[in-house]
Amino acid sequence: MAKSFNFSEAPGHLIRRAQQLAVAIFMEETAAFDATPVQFAILNALIDDPGEDQITLSGRVAFDPATFGSVIGRIEAKGWVKREADPSDKRRKLLWITPEGEQVALQMKRAATRAQQRILSPLDAEERVQFSRLLSKLVVGHVNATKD
C-alpha cells in the first residue's frame, strides 16, 4: 500500500504553518490598531516613499497587485492614506500616508517588534540570525529566479 505524503516535514507545509503563526502573533500584538501585516507594511513603505504608485508599492510589499487596490481602499477609509490620480497619467494612482496613518504606523512599531520577537522566541540568538538569513536567501533566490 502506498504511503501518504509526509506534510509534517514538507518545507511548503512548514512555511505555511509558520506564516499562520506569524500572522496570529502579529494580530495579537497589534490588536489595538485593527491593522493587518500588509497594511502595516504599506504604511511603513509610504513613510519611506510618499507618493509611490500602487503597482510599484504592491511589489515593494510583495502583495498581489490585483487585490492591492482593495487593501488600499480599506486603509484609505480609515483615513491612513490618500490616493490620487497621477497628473501625467490618470490611470496611475499615487499614494501618500496621512498624518494619522503615520502616527498609527509609528505607534505600531513597538507592537510589531514584540511580534517579531515572539515569532522567533523558540530559537536561541544564533538560530534566530541563521533562520532569518536562510529565509532571506530562500525568498531572494526564488525572486531572482523569476526575473531570469
Image (spheres, helix red, strand yellow):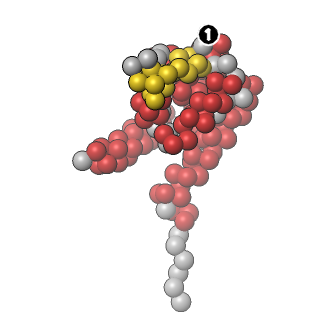
Residue 59 percent across, percent down from the top left: 43, 35
Which quadrant of the view contains residue 133?
Answer: top left
- Relative to 82, residue 37 above or below: below
Which residue sits at x=59%, y=52%? 17
Front residue of 26/85: it is 85
In this rendering, would 95 be left or right of 89? right
**73 w.r.t. 20: above or below:** above
Q: The residue under label 1 is which amino acid type?
A: Pro
User: How many numbered discs?
Assistant: 1
Crowding at mark 1 (Cα within 10 Å: few <14, some 14-19, many 20+)? few
Q: Which residue has dot 1 on it?
A: 99
Q: Residue drawn at (46%, 29%), measured in percent from left and top? A: 91
Toward the right, the furthest residue is: 32
Q: x, y (%) of residue 147?
A: 28, 45
The reply to whether residue 120 is visible in this rendering is no
Which of the 4 image quadrants contains residue 139? top left
User: Residue visible at 75% across and 25% down?
Assistant: 32
Q: Quadrant of residue 70?
A: top right
* Residue situated furthest bottom in the rendering: 1
Which residue lies at the image location 63% right of the left edge and 30% below the top edge?
Answer: 73
SS under mark 1: helix
In the current view of this chain or complex, which residue is farthest to the left? 148
Task: Report x, y in % for residue 26.
Answer: 64, 34
Eyeballing the image, is 123 above or below 113? below
Relative horizontal placement of residue 118, taking residue 47 as reference (left or right) = right
Is residue 89 among what the camera can see? Answer: yes
The image shows residue 69 at horizontal and vertical percentages of 56, 35
Q: Residue furthest top?
A: 99
Q: Is residue 37 left or right of residue 46?
A: right
Foreground pick, 45 / 72: 72
